[in-house]
Image: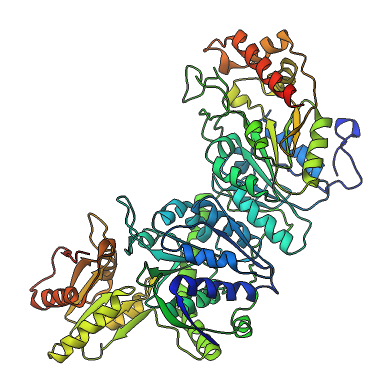
Amino acid sequence: MNEPLLEGMVQTDRDRGENLLRAGNTNCGGCGMSVGLLMLGRAAADRPIQLVIPACCGIVTAGPFPASAYGAPVVASTFASAAAVGAGLAHVARLNGEPTRVVCWAGDGGTYDIGMATLSAAAERDDDVLYICYDNEIYGNTGGQRSSATPQGAATTTTPHGKVGEKKDILAIMAAHRVPYAATLSLAHPEDMLRKMREALELRGFRFLHLLSPCPTGWKSEPADGLELVRLAVRSGLYLVYEVFGGSHVRLNVEPELSEPALERYFALQGRFKRSKVDLRQVREGIRAQLEELRRRL
Amino acid sequence: MSRELVSANHAAAMAAVLAARANRSGRGFGSGVYPITPQTECIELLCEEEIEKGQVVRVESEHSAMAVCIGFSLGGARTFTASSSNGLAYMAENVFNAAFYRLPVVMMAVNRTLGPPWNIWVDHGDTLMLRDAGWVQLYCEDNQEVADTILAAYRLGEDPRILLPVMVCQDAFILSHTMMLTDFPEQPEVDAFLPPLELPHRLTDRPRVVGGLDFPRETEVHRIQHANAMALVPEVYREVQATFRSRFGRALADPVVPYRVEDAEMLLVSMGTTASTVRTVVDRARERGIRAGALRLRMFRPFPEEALRGYLAGRARVGVLDRNLCPGLGGIVWAELRGVAPPGCLVQGYVLGMGGGDIRPEHVERVLQDLTSRQRAGEPSFVEVGS
């Protein structure tokens, strides 16, 4: 039995019998991915889903063979292959007239970096796959190395003095593939997140969701601060919550306040930015530029 | 039955399409395809065909070609792909994966030299690089054998006692681009030979993880299961041969194919099309009163140890002709075959035809001459054949 969550807003008469993320999972306390998985389970409700998870924290989540902390069947794919394995599974479901929805659940390393070609190809073919990237902005599984999703200034084990380059704009890249649906998800805005997950599960063709996923271990932040960090990222405009239909029709779902205190607090709460002394003026300029660009497309 | 004049690339694709259609009453067929010389015509033909309950996915790399096949196979569909040389090297990670997931994927591999420098001609080093990938490996000598072996590969790999992927190998251009008359069975005959695939561990709605974390104890057990399945391959292959003969009315070649071995004092061992040239040389030697014979190694994985021991027993000299080179070791077939030769038997390795040089009878004559005159085995010997 599911416990009432979020004042009952996620409850429906089609709820899954059990959570998608079950007890016994190996996630760290405060992991954003855990909340994301619980929400995905709510959104999927009683639809049969199959998960494809490449090498990332998300596959360690399951625990060792023969146990599984996932309440759905999972394929553990090679690092770069999630979208391609998902494409194969989705085709079999279609050929056999089955309602199964295939969901790729991948970290930023498997999405922004090693899996980029596979992801791009599946998007270009419009394979019937929902691809969700939970982005903790590092290679978490291997102990916190930089990825192309790591933001400028963040210290990682391979950028101990802070990363020099900027974070890749994954949603722009995916939208440029003109996929039916691409959106960012905020853990601090569960209603919006749930709606988008439901919509993405319902649509056919290639759908992409990006989830900013706080990682207390890598971000050097308090586990309890995870959702607050996402809220600050949204309020400050660092993380824009929006959706893109067919690569062209853009909708901004949460109006950013462009709050100065929120921006300062976002960086202050994370140890990974301590050493590099992020230039907030530069960050603000970046936010403005991105927002202007987005507004042009609205 | 129909008789067609086709290249071995097309023979492989046509056989794969027959196998694909045979699973229309099962969970269908799927393929991830990516071009590379000299197998491209194979996947092109696959893309032309209408396959009921089938889907060919045109992917962006060999790595994804195998990944898509893995997805199809885990969904319970029959699968096929083809690759070659550097394509196989790029695909390698998922080649191992398909075997470790215990998926009966069938792949046609055209043997081509690994680059750089770029060379598109035959060399067995590419598939031999994958000899430890946990796949069954079969090497063919003509187009008919390519078509027949593809069909047999499904029957073998999908057997519930085996559940392993099968690589069907053929020589670049010498077979891949050469047209030969090839017999193909009719669809109903193939339907009877290849019942719908029942993959016991295919993904259903039941929560579990395929290919997730394994601790040492579990990995040990999984590996032993894999080894045990491999060990059963020769026995199940014999059954496949019998069924093949009764369904299609012709023989499917043995894992080790002997030639004039009955009273032979010395044997020449080779793989793929080299064996045809070797037979010519054996015939000539016999005319000169030399008691030579030949073995063609058709199955390389599992290594047909028992059959080889039987054929090698009592021979004084064995020459192994390798169309590949493992620098620092020598020819790979030679290296493996040494382990099954009887005590006192002189086993000499010869490396020839690397990079696709034309192995002609005179080159094999040189091998035979050297083997006959040797007092003892030595370092692997290079027989340069030029172009």
Quadrant for the C terminus of chain A, please.
Answer: top right
Q: Position of residue A239 (x, y in %)?
A: 69, 23
Is A28 in front, or is B12? B12
Q: Position of residue B223 (x, y in %)?
A: 48, 60
Q: Position of residue B214 (x, y in %)?
A: 55, 50
Horizontal side of B280 relative to B29 (left or right) equals left
Horizontal side of A45 relative to A271 (left or right) equals right
How was the colour assigned to the protein in this rendering? rainbow
The answer to which quarter of the image holds residue A60 is top right
**Residue drawn at point x = 27 percent, y = 70 percent:** B337
Q: Position of residue A102 (x, y in %)?
A: 71, 50
Judge whether A106 appears above or below B103 on screen: above
The answer to which quarter of the image holds residue B251 is bottom left
Is A148 in front, or is B96? A148
Is B294 in front, or is A282? A282
Tell me if I can see residue B313 in this picture: no
Tell me if I can see residue B218 in this picture: yes
**Residue drawn at point x = 64 percent, y = 84 percent:** B188
